[in-house]
Image (tube, rainbow, N blue to C red):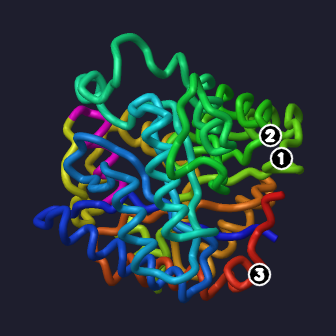
Amino acid sequence: MTRLSILDLSPITQGSDAAESFRRTLDLARHAETWGYQRYWLAEHHGMPGVASAATAVLIGHVAGGTRHIRVGAGGIMLPNHSPLVIAEQFGTLASLYPGRIDLGLGRAPGSDPVTARALRRHGGLAADEFDQDVAELQAYFADQAHSGVRAVPGAGLDVPVWILGSSLYGAQLAAQLGLPFAFASHFAPAQMMDAIGLYRSLFEPSAQLARPHVMLGLNVFAADTDAEARRLFSSLQQAFVNLRTGRPAPLPPPNPDAIEALSPPAVAMLDQALACSAVGSPETVARQVREFIARTGADELMVTSQVFDHAARLRSFGLLAEVLPDMVRAPAAALA
């Protein structure tokens, strides 16, 4: 049974600030736990006026400390920005504080613009080119296999499930080679989704962490009482994407369908491609679209994200999704073995 999880960028809405975003993140996580979502992941982005989830491990601790049993994790840590030892210690700390609840998704992109990326790099050169070595080093710390005589304390010997995140065939191949679960960023980069799924499943080699391939796919979901209202809410994300792709990142704007109607044909085509993996509509419409997406992809898990401007409407969107797909939130936890 496909399970539903949540990806949160802790969006900063127009006229608000990061402190309010963090309060809303914890409130959503508590509701998600009540509704039965499988896990709650926080992203890593830097230098973006509309995204507050920069210090991801800190925010994970905030959410895990304010909830009881839902799994909390990184979707993901952009490993080229960090020393593997530091991540092992951070997530070893989280796993020690909240045993059995912490996930670690690893990404290869910087999660920022080129200038910010250079400021984040821990050394010169292209750290992304060393991603596979960094993943191996991180796994060695958790396995208590000293790397060059160094141990991660805390971290050594702890069970911190590692995921590979990606939006291309590279991540699919690495996840398959290492026998790790694979999360694909289809919610904003769907072009290679089907090829990546096929490659991952065909090349998968069982590991101590995972016996069978496990595919998680990102999906934008905007649920409301009517199709028209859901499309109105969706216009916030559409505006944010246009702003980002045209080099004008900004806080998440309020809904404005007229702004979308006024876009040029190339901008509309960009949105249609980037946000193709979206379920937008009434509860019945969204339920049908989600089930069609699962039937087409065979996803083992969906990582649902919803950049809704109004917090109450955002809560309602996730609540309606859980209400119309009860089998996906009330089923036994998805096994990763």
> Horizontal placement of 330 versus 6: left or right?
right
Q: Residues within 10 Å of mark 2 (few under 14, many from 20)?
A: many
Question: What span is in magenta?
Answer: 236-247
Residue shown at the point (24%, 44%) measured from the top left: 48
Sequence order check, earlier mark of 2 and 1: 2
Q: Nearer the viewer, mark 3 or mark 1?
A: 1
Q: Residue furthest front?
A: 149
- Residue 157's x, y, as percent? 66, 51
How many angstroms separate mark 3 from mark 1 (CA)?
A: 25 Å
Find the distance from the CA under tag 2 to the CA under tag 1.
Answer: 8 Å
138 and 293: which one is in front?
138
**Closer mark to the observer between disc 2 and disc 1:** 1
Q: How would you classify the magenta stretch by its main secondary structure? A: helix
Residue assigned mark 1: 208
Residue tagged 2: 179
Question: Which residue type carries mark 2?
Answer: Gly
Whichever of labels 2 and 3 marks the residue nearer the N terminus, that label is 2
Residue 54 in picture, x, y percent from top left: 31, 49
Question: Which quarter of the figure has residue 101?
Answer: bottom right
Q: Is residue 99 left or right of residue 254?
A: right
User: Which dot, 2 or 3, sits closer to the camera?
Assistant: 2
Along the viewing direction, whichever of 121 and 259 lies nearer the viewer: 121
In the rendered image, the vertical position of residue 127 relative to residue 298, given as above or below = above
Q: Relative to 13, does residue 319 appear above or below in the rendering?
A: below
Q: Contact (CB < 8 A) between labels 3 and 1?
A: no
Of callouts 3 and 1, which one flags the residue occurring earlier in the amino acid sequence?
1
Name the residue tied to disc 3: 331
Task: Name the element at disc 3.
Answer: loop
Given the image, on which type of amino acid does mark 3 rest? Ala
Residue 213 percent across, percent down from the top left? 83, 48
Would you say the residues marked 2 and 1 are in contact, meaning their CB atoms lie under 8 Å apart? yes
The reply to whether the magenta stretch includes residue 152 is no
